[in-house]
Image (spheres, rainbow, N blue to C red):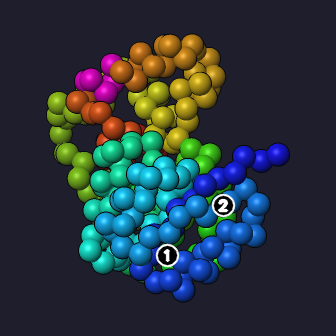
Amino acid sequence: MEQTIQIMLVDDHALLRSGLKLLLQKKPPFKVVGEAANGIEALRLYEDLRPHLLILDISLPRLDGIQVLREIKLRHEEAKVIVLTMHEDEDYITSIMQAGASGYIPKAAVDEELYTAIDSVMNGYMYLRPKETKTLISSMLKKVPKEADSRNPYVILSPREREVLRFLVRGYSLAETAKALTVSIKTVDTHKTRMMNKLNISKKSELIEYALEYRLLIE
């Protein structure tokens, strides 16, 4: 029997929440356990419910979705959040992903992509369509420094640390990374700790941003 995936919906339009709920009810593992119509309510309800997944609209009254996302990720780094929005410009997508979103779906594509996005995120991966992936990488690469600096991975990270980093930011667990590299979980964890200390990084979202900045996902 499949484990129930508890989902919380946040959107200020009751009609859209109803539509999402109907879509999710078609898949037995998915269960909507709560709904919120504004940012303040969303934060309170998330703390009460601690759902497996949050589906979050960005345009919210009282507290906008990006602020909600940042606050939730600050409190719960492991939180999985799929963002829904009508905005698709480069800066907007980049800000959403940098805030800690696990995935992004334009509202116009929800019917076709919702199940795929949820499956991807719940399996530990980020969900971005090819267009958004290219946009995000292009945006981050614009920030790459021309010369080596104190954060350049080829200056301060060992080859093995760079390998571990590439697996972790793609959503692999410590165990999965260890298996792929044929080393122990303890070894992977040691590399991760050393690497994050060197980079002065404490969150996985910062690791993802760093890997994008230095092209480590497209080597």
The image quadrant of residue 181 is top right
Asked whether, in this view, residue 91 is left or right of residue 20, the answer is left
Residue drawn at x 19%, y 45% is 146
Camera sees residue 142? yes
Residue drawn at x 41%, y 28% is 162
- Outermost residue to the front: 48
Q: Position of residue 111 (x, y in %)?
A: 64, 77
Q: Amino acid at mark 2?
A: Lys
Q: Is residue 33 above or below residue 64?
A: above
Asked whether, in this view, residue 85 is left or right of residue 7, the answer is left
Nearest the camera: 28 or 117? 28
Mark 1, other Cα within 10 Å: few <14 / some 14–19 / many ≥20: some
Q: Amino acid at mark 1?
A: Pro
- Outermost residue to the bottom: 15
Q: Position of residue 101 (x, y in %)?
A: 42, 56
| Range of magenta residues | 194-198
Marking on residue 65: none
Query: Mark 1 against mark 2, which lies toward the viewer?
Result: 2
Q: Which residue is mark 1?
A: 106
- Check if residue 197 falls in the magenta segment: yes
Q: Is residue 5 above or below residue 131?
A: above
Residue drawn at x 23%, y 53% is 143
Camera sees residue 90? no
Give the CA distance from mark 1 to mark 2: 22 Å
* Secondary element type, mark 1: strand
Q: Position of residue 2 (x, y in %)?
A: 77, 47
The image quadrant of residue 148 is top left
Q: Is residue 206 above or below residue 183?
A: below
Magenta region, mostly helix, strand or loop?
helix
Q: Which residue is mark 2?
A: 31
Q: Is residue 21 above or below residue 165?
A: below
Q: Identify the mark nearer the N-term, 1 or 2.
A: 2
